[in-house]
Structures are given as structure tokens and as C-alpha cells.
Image (cartoon, rainbow, N blue to C red):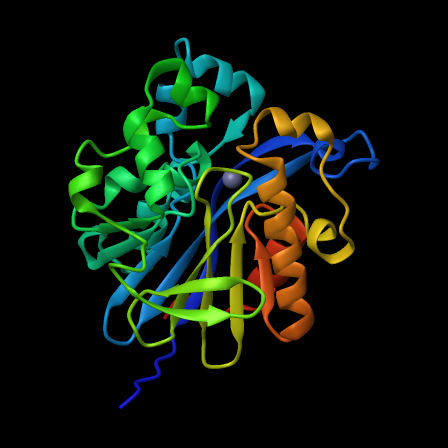
Amino acid sequence: MITIMNVKFWLKSAGYCTSHQHFALRGSKRKTIRFPATYGLIHHPVHGWILFDTGYTRRFFEGTQRFPGSIYGRLTPVFIQPEEEVVSALRESGIKPEEIKHIIISHFHADHTGGMLDFPQARFYASPEALEQVNSVSGFQAVRRGILTNQIPRDLMERSVPLTEENFSTKEDPHLGTLIDLFDDGSILLVSLPGHAKGQMGAILRTESQHVFLIADACWLKETWQENRLPHPIVKLFFDSWTDFTDSLTRIRNYHQANPETVIIPCHCQDTVNEIMSLQAEIY
Ligand SMILES: [Zn+2]
């Protein structure tokens, strides 16, 4: 018998950084814009509460006080209030940290890993490539790849399940390729979206009313996937692979053409985030 499950989903944000719009979108205005650090809060009828990424926490400031982390701090000014941190926001909604049993990490950049240390009961899910990288870099090499090691749990590898075909059942999508079926019920499908960062993963969630595709940093602003407007070439300096980045974008655009009803969420796009947040009901 095939079991089909739906999840509930809320998009939340934990702080933001500022940067220049013309970096995110070449040819656009030279103005400073906010990039909210969002995370997904998911509720599964059997597996309970799940996070997709964990936003910023004040650990960013500890990790960027001294060299080499200080380089990161200067590149992206970060703003985060204690009550915005994922663990505080969850408590406010009546969800205890130990109730979070599963955390999907799209990639290990500091704006996605800030809250990892706050959930000691959680199992982590990430691509084998991303896990391999975060486990092998330190010092300047880590910062160069957007990783702040003070935010990464020391027992990460023991608590992680690599998202591989050996560990999970899979589905094939004609546009996205192989998808990992996290709970083998079609409710959360994980999609390889490399380029921005090594082994980056996105997630397609099936909720009662629609499908939601969290594309993480596969692009920053909606204009990139909607109109194929690319970021400024300078960002190539920070990307893992430009070829993989444009290939991931093409796959997302093709998927959208075939599935126009699916809501696509680039996790740092303020316009998209505002739109989603204005529609979603309060938790409970
Ligand atoms: Zn990011």
C-alpha cells in the first residue's frame, strides 16, 4: 500500500543581512536591500516538527569577532534580535527545542546554520558533499566557503544522515532528476541544487492546499528564476560552481513550466517572503 501524507508549513525568518541589489541582480539599481534569513517550520502528522535550515543567531557575532571570521562579518552586516532566533520563536509558539527531531540543512553557510546548536535531540539531513566539506575545512578555508565553525555541532557527523540513494527511497522527476523521499511518503522530497554552495539541497513539500518548493539560495531574488536575470558576475568569487548554479536554475525553471501551481520560494527574496507570510496563518 502506498501511503501519501501531507505536511503543514510555515515560513519564518531569523534576522537578515544587507547587501547591494546589483550584486543579486546584475544591471539593477545600486541600492542596499535586506536579505531575510528564513527557515521553514514543517509539521508532519507522524514525524512531528521539522526544520528546513535554522537562520541567524547571535552566534554569528561571536564567530566573526576575530580573524578569519571577521572577514565574513565585514562582507555581510547582520541584524538579529534574541527573540527572532529560531529557538525563541518556537518557544513563543509553544514548541520546545527537544520536540525538533529532524533538521534539513540546505547548505552550511552561516545564515542557514545559526540555530543548529539549539536542538540537541535533532537528527540532521544534508547532502554527502556538503557534509564532507563542512567536516574537512577549518580556519580561513571554512570562512572562504561561508562556514562559521562555531555554529556547527561537534557531533554533527554522528547525528547526520547523508541524503543518498542508499539511505532513502527516491523518485525521478523529468526536470529535477532524482529526488530523495525523506519519509518515504512523498510529503518531503529533497532536490539537489548545487552551484551556490557545494551539495546544496532544496525541498518540495506537499501541503494540503499546494506544493511548496524551497529552493534555498539557488537564486536570491524571484526575478532570477522568473525572468532568468542572473546575479552580478562578481558573486562567482563566492560560488562553488557557476556552471552548476546556472544548471540548477534551468532545472527549476523547467520544473516551474511543468508545475506552474507549485509555489517557489527563494529563501532570501524579501518580496516572496512578504507574500508567503501575508498568507500563512499563525502557528496553532
Ligand atoms: Zn543563504
Left or right side of 29 for 105: left
At x 43%, y 56%, the residue is: 40
Residues 28 and 115: in front is 28
At x 37%, y 39%, the residue is: 130
Residues 72 and 237: in front is 237
Q: Does residue 158 sit above or below 44 in this rendering?
A: above
At x 58%, y 47%, the residue is: 218
Q: Does residue 74 sit above or below 98 in this rendering?
A: above
Left or right side of 224 for 274: left
Q: Quadrant of residue 62?
A: top left
**Residue 76 image point, x, y percent:** 56, 25
Query: Dividing the image into 4 quarters, which one contains the C terminus?
Result: bottom left
**Residue 106 image point, x, y percent:** 42, 47
Q: Does residue 7 sit above or below 60 in this rendering?
A: below
At x 69%, y 25%, the residue is: 234
Q: Quadrant of residue 185?
A: bottom left
The answer to whether residue 231 of the structure is visible from this angle is yes
